[in-house]
Image: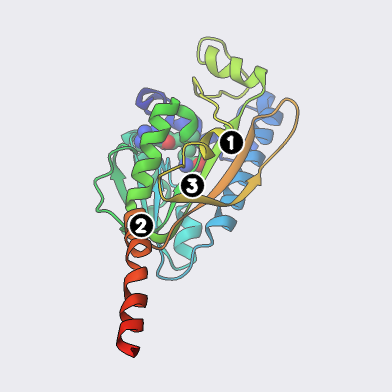
Amino acid sequence: MTRIFETEADRWVSVYRPTSSGEPRFAIFQESVRRRLFRRRDLALELLDPRPGMTVLDIGCGHGTFARQVLDAGARWVGADISIEMLRRGQTALADAGDAPRWMNAEASALPVRSNAFDAVLCIGVLNYHTLDEVERILVELGRVLRPGGTAVVSSLRLDPITWARSRLYPTVPVPVGVPGPLFPHPADRITGLLDGKDLAVVASLDVKKYGFQPHYTLLKLARSKRPVEERRRVAFRSPRPRIGVGATRE
Ligand SMILES: C[S@@+](CC[C@H](N)C(=O)[O-])C[C@H]1O[C@@H](n2cnc3c(N)ncnc32)[C@H](O)[C@@H]1O
């Protein structure tokens, strides 16, 4: 996985650029991919709703696609990515923001971050590079670093057969716009199915696109409950006792 983005960093960054910077003959394809990615980014930001003072961890931040808008909203942004090359591209792209964006070279399932540290977490375009077991480990870690009551926005992916094949063949077969792969599409319900017992619940979901031959992203907004699961259990267990106590005092 790391290898894909270490060697494909420039290609990934270029997908986010206006078509004029791509190869003209592929412009129409590039524009279509770009539009979808921008739509995904804007909708994810809408769900995230960054506010002044909020701390946001962007897991698999790539070249900092979300950093500018999060910082402009007055929130603090920390990006974590396994690929040093992607982080380098990000630092260059956001050089004018000084040391406001913080960059971290880290694996999503083992983040060097204390528990409950962030108000919000983003994980966009990342889970689809992992097997279901790996996705589960990433979600556990995401829940650990998110503070109780915090929210996360993650993306799931359903693929049409053509894009799936393109991602499998890439980079062996030249394609108009590369789909760094292989991709492991996990539709939204598969991701939701992993949330049981993780103290995370889906509070909103948004479909980015639904064409026959297009990848179909669903953005899931997850919320961590205000109290950790163990604490809720303890409260429920304890609750009869004060009532008995109050009754006894009145008598
Ligand atoms: C498709 S890019 C998406 C970048 C950005 N989130 C966006 O939406 O534009 C995926 C990024 O996730 C990173 N990534 C994938 N798996 C990761 C993992 N297990 N830990 C950390 N970063 C990971 C890759 O290095 C790459 O930069």
CB of mark 1 near ligand 1 (< 8 Å)? no
Seen in the picture, residue 225 relative to 89 is either above or below; the reply is: below
* Residue ranking furthest to the front: 251
Q: Residue at x 38, y 49 (%)?
A: 143
At label 2, which amino acid type do we have?
A: Arg
Ligand 1 within 8 angstroms of badge 3 C-beta: yes
Q: Quick check: marks 2 and 3 in contact, CB under 8 Å? A: no
Q: Nearer the viewer, residue 191 or 113?
A: 191
Distance of label 3 from label 1 (alpha carbons): 26 Å
Question: Measured from the top left, where is residue 132 in percent x and y?
Answer: 45, 27
x 65%, y 39%: residue? 36
Where is 139 relative to 56, above or below?
above
Disc 2 residue crowd, few under 14, some 14–19, many 20+, Cα 10 Å: few
Label 2 to label 1, Cα distance in Å?
27 Å
Q: Position of residue 94 (x, y in %)?
A: 41, 52
Q: Earlier in the sequence, mark 2 or mark 3?
A: 3
Marked residue nearer the N-terminal end (3 or 1):
3
Q: What percent of the width, then of the height, locates residue 181?
A: 49, 21
Using the image as rendered, state which of residue 108 and residue 18 is in the foreground: 108
Number of residues whose C-alpha sits closer than 10 Å to that of mark 1, classed few (under 14), some (14–19) or many (20 or more): few
Placement of 4 over or under 211, stated as above or below: above
Residue found at the far right of this picture: 212
User: Circle 3 is placed at which residue position?
Assistant: 65
- Of marks 2 and 1, the one in the foreground: 2
Q: Which residue is mark 2?
A: 233
| Residue beneath disc 1 | 189
x, y percent for residue 226: 41, 63
Quadrant housing the N terminus:
top left
Nearest the eye: 149 or 172:
149
